[in-house]
Amino acid sequence: METFLLVLAALFPVVNPPGSSLIFLSMTGSASGETRRFLARRVAVNAFFIMAASLLVGGLILKIYGISVPVLRVAGGLLVAATGWKLLNEGSHKAVDGVSSRGGKPDFSDLTFYPLTLPLTTGPGTIAVMISLGLSHSTQQENVAFFVAALFAVIVVAFTIYVCFAYSHWVARVAGSVGTDILVRLTAFILFCLGLQIIWSGASELIGTIAVQRAASDQLPMTTTMIVPHVVSRIFAIG
């Protein structure tokens, strides 16, 4: 239960389904309710697979490219904190890039993965958080419980994405522009704090590694200075 709440608390501010649903609504405003629900289901499924893949095989990808866990946490924390800071200043007005205006009736199915799923819903910040969480387990017994609870949290987030996107017009109607902006800014502040926490965790490990390496390098000259006089005294004693 603790792992489930941890993963859910880490994912929800990053994914931000209520805030992203307003972007979804603005990009699919001319679509029918049935089409909007179909698109929401596709986006939710895509988001689930992206989050699950980052959680399960993200560590393997790091090993292939030789990236250490502390470096990942610092880089991911910087990205998460930057995203939170940007949302904190922009509120619910996320920038939508890479969407070109096309003549005629738009084909909304072409937008399900890019840009609706990646990067608007599950962007680099979400991927960095999932990889960091996937690398935080220790023993084999804890692995099973951790991944089951984490995947259950991912399912809950994906279901929340579907609900918020499929009924995005109700979210905007109930919360209103001011309420939605307040909600996005509060979650953005939590996201910014989460990014700083990830940075501090990775930086602490890096500083600890540097301290261990310095201690090891300092012990080598001291050992040499202690061994050389002892060897010389033994030679003179034998002579």
Image (cartoon, grey):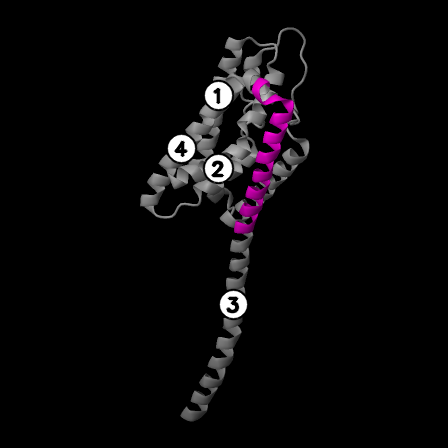
Whether the residues at callouts 1 and 4 have beta carbons within 8 Å, the answer is: no
The secondary structure making up most of the magenta span is: helix
Image quadrant for the N terminus?
A: top left
Say above or below: 227 vs 10.
Answer: below
**Which secondary structure lies at badge 4?**
helix
In front: label 1 or label 4 = 1
Q: What SS does tag 3 mark?
A: helix
Separation of residues labelled 1 and 2 (CA atoms): 18 Å
Local crowd at mark 2 within 10 Å, few (<14), some, or many (≥20)?
Answer: some
| Residue 34 coordinates in the image, percent (x, y) | 50, 9
Provide the residue designation for mark 2: 9
Look at label 3 and name its amino acid: Ala
Q: Nearer the viewer, mark 4 or mark 2?
A: 2
Q: Which residue is mark 3?
A: 215
The kind of residue tagged 2 is Ala
| Residue named by callout 1 | 162
Under tag 2, what secondary structure? helix
Mark pair 4, 3: CA separation: 41 Å
Query: Which of 154 and 91 lies nearest the eye of the viewer?
Result: 91
